[in-house]
Image (tube, helix red, strand yellow):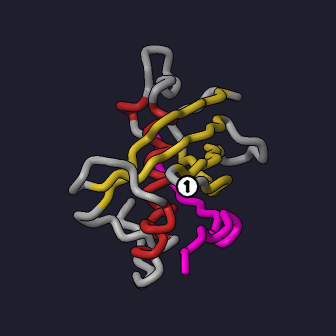
Amino acid sequence: MTATLLPATHYRVTEMTHHVRPSDLDMFGHVNHAKPIDYFELGRFDWLTQNRFPLDERWTPVVARIEVHYRRELFLTQIRVQTVLAELKQYTAEFQQSVFVPGHDAPAVTGSVRVSFISKKTKRPMRLRDVEALACFQEPRETAIA
């Protein structure tokens, strides 16, 4: 029997908060354009943790493509990063991510991130059903991001 991928809707949408650090700011006093990519990475790590994907010696997620849309400036504040698994294919997962600031319903930054899961042993992409099979036997863990 061949295992099939669970639908993307099977996985929970995650949200995490993070404080913009002074070192994230550029000379104009707003968040440097490259920093939201870091925030997206924090959000994906949180998503993997909350959806019981074991980060271990067998595999690692690698960004294959990223697209970022800047909608409003970010300043020194607390942000909320939302991560949604939008699509699963045989070897890639597509995440839709958004960065929100207090007092605004619309996101300040949105992005689409395509991720491959690479075997640490072979250095080749793994089929997502194999990564899922590893994840299905893990207990939920608290995220280590503060």
Left/right placement of residue 109 relative to residue 42 reads right
Report the span colored magenta: 1-20
In the rendered image, the vertical position of residue 37 relative to residue 123, given as above or below: above
Q: Position of residue 46 (x, y in %)?
A: 47, 61
Does the magenta segment cover residue 102? Answer: no
- Image quarter in which the C terminus is found: bottom left
Q: Residue at x 39, y 50 (%)?
A: 125
Secondary-structure class at tag 1: loop
Which image quadrant is residue 1 in? Answer: bottom right
What amino acid does circle 1 point to?
Answer: Gln
Q: Position of residue 6 (x, y in %)?
A: 62, 71
Left/right placement of residue 70 relative to residue 117 reads right
Q: Position of residue 104 (x, y in %)?
A: 75, 44
Q: Which of the two residues, 106 or 52, is positioned nearer the viewer here?
A: 52
Left/right placement of residue 104 relative to residue 31 reads right
Q: Residue at x 41, y 31 (%)?
A: 24
Q: Residue at x 73, y 46 (%)?
A: 103
Does the magenta segment cover residue 15? Answer: yes
Left/right placement of residue 65 relative to residue 111 reads left
Q: Residue at x 46, y 37 (%)?
A: 64
Q: Which of the two residues, 146 or 15, is positioned nearer the viewer here?
A: 15
Q: Which residue is mark 1?
A: 90
Residue 80 visible in rendering: no
In the rendered image, the vertical position of residue 134 relative to residue 45, given as above or below: below
Residue 143 visible in rendering: yes
Q: Position of residue 48 (x, y in %)?
A: 46, 63
Query: From this viewpoint, which residue is outermost toward the right?
Result: 105
